[in-house]
Image (tube, rainbow, N blue to C red):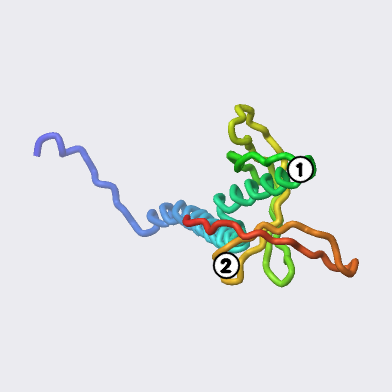
C-alpha cells in the first residue's frame, strides 16, 4: 500500500479510557442535579396550583363587579329618587391580592385589584380599585357575591349574598 508505510496505529488501552470517564462523571453529576432541581420545581408548581384552585373564573369576577356596580347605582338612584341606568360594561380586571376565607359556613375568597368599566351610553372608561368577597357554592359549581353587613352580636360578621351567573367556561 502506497502512502501508508510510515504510519503507525497508536495503541489504545483501558487505562487511557479512564480519562474519558473522568470527564463523563462530572457531567453525570451535573445532569443528576439538573433533573433533581426540575423535579423540585414541578412538585412546587403542583402544590401552588392546588392552592390556586379557589380562584373564581374571570367571567365570575366580571359578573360580580357588574353586580356590585349595579347595587351601588341602584342605592344611589333610590336615595336621589332617580332611575338607575342599565348594566355597566366591565373589562380588564387586574388582581393584586387574593386570600381564602370563610363566609358563614361556606368557603369564600377575598379579591383586591383594579378594573376598567363604563356605564351604558357613556364614552368614558373608568379605572377603579375594587374589593370583592365571593362565596363558593356548596358543590363548588357556583359563586355568590357576598357583601359584609355588620355583626349581629359584635363578634361575627354577617353577610348578604347575591347569586351570580354560572360561568360556562
Which residue in the structure is indicated by mark 1? 76
Residue 2, above or below 40:
above
**Which residue, as the protein is rendered here, is positioned at the far top?**
123
- Which quarter of the picture shows residue 36? bottom right
CA distance for labels 2 and 1:
33 Å
**Can you identify the residue that label 2 sits on?**
140
| x and y, in percent, of residue 61 in the image | 61, 50
Q: Say which quadrant the N terminus sits in.
A: top left
Which is more N-terminal, label 1 or label 2?
Answer: 1
Q: Nearer the viewer, mark 2 or mark 1?
A: 1
Q: What residue do we see at 74% from left, 57% from top?
A: 147
Most extreme residue toward the right, as rendered?
154
Q: Residue 97: which disc? A: none
Residue at far front of view:
81
Under circle 1, the secondary element is: helix
| Label 2: which secondary element | loop
Is 102 displayed left or right of 122 in the figure? Answer: right
| Residue 48, image x, y percentages | 61, 59
Residue 8, above or below 17? above
* Residue ranking furthest to the left: 1
Question: Dot 2: few (<14), some (14–19), or many (≥20) neighbours within 10 Å?
Answer: few
Residue 111, position in %: x, y?
69, 52
116 or 159: nearer the eye? 159
Label 1: few (<14), some or many (≥20) within 10 Å? some
> What residue is shown at x 70% (from left), y 49% (from top)?
71
Does residue 104 appear anywhere in the picture? Answer: yes
Amino acid at each position: 500500500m502506497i502512502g501508508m508505510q510510515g504510519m503507525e496505529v497508536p495503541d489504545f488501552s483501558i487505562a487511557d479510557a479512564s480519562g474519558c470517564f473522568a470527564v463523563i462523571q462530572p457531567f453525570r453529576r451535573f445532569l443528576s442535579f439538573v433533573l433533581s432541581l426540575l423535579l423540585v420545581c414541578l412538585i412546587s408548581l403542583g402544590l401552588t396550583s392546588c392552592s390556586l384552585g379557589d380562584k373564581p373564573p374571570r367571567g365570575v369576577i366580571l359578573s360580580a363587579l357588574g353586580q356590585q356596580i349595579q347595587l351601588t347605582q341602584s342605592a344611589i338612584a333610590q336615595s336621589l329618587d332617580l332611575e338607575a341606568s342599565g348594566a355597566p360594561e366591565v373589562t380588564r380586571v387586574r388582581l393584586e391580592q387574593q386570600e381564602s376565607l370563610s363566609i358563614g359556613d361556606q368557603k369564600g375568597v377575598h379579591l383586591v385589584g383594579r378594573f376598567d368599566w363604563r356605564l351604558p351610553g357613556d364614552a368614558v372608561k373608568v379605572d377603579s380599585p375594587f374589593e370583592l368577597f365571593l362565596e363558593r357554592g356548596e358543590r363548588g359549581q357556583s359563586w355568590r357575591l357576598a357583601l359584609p353587613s355588620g355583626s349581629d352580636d359584635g363578634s361575627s360578621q354577617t353577610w348578604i349574598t347575591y347569586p351570580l351567573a354560572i360561568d360556562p367556561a
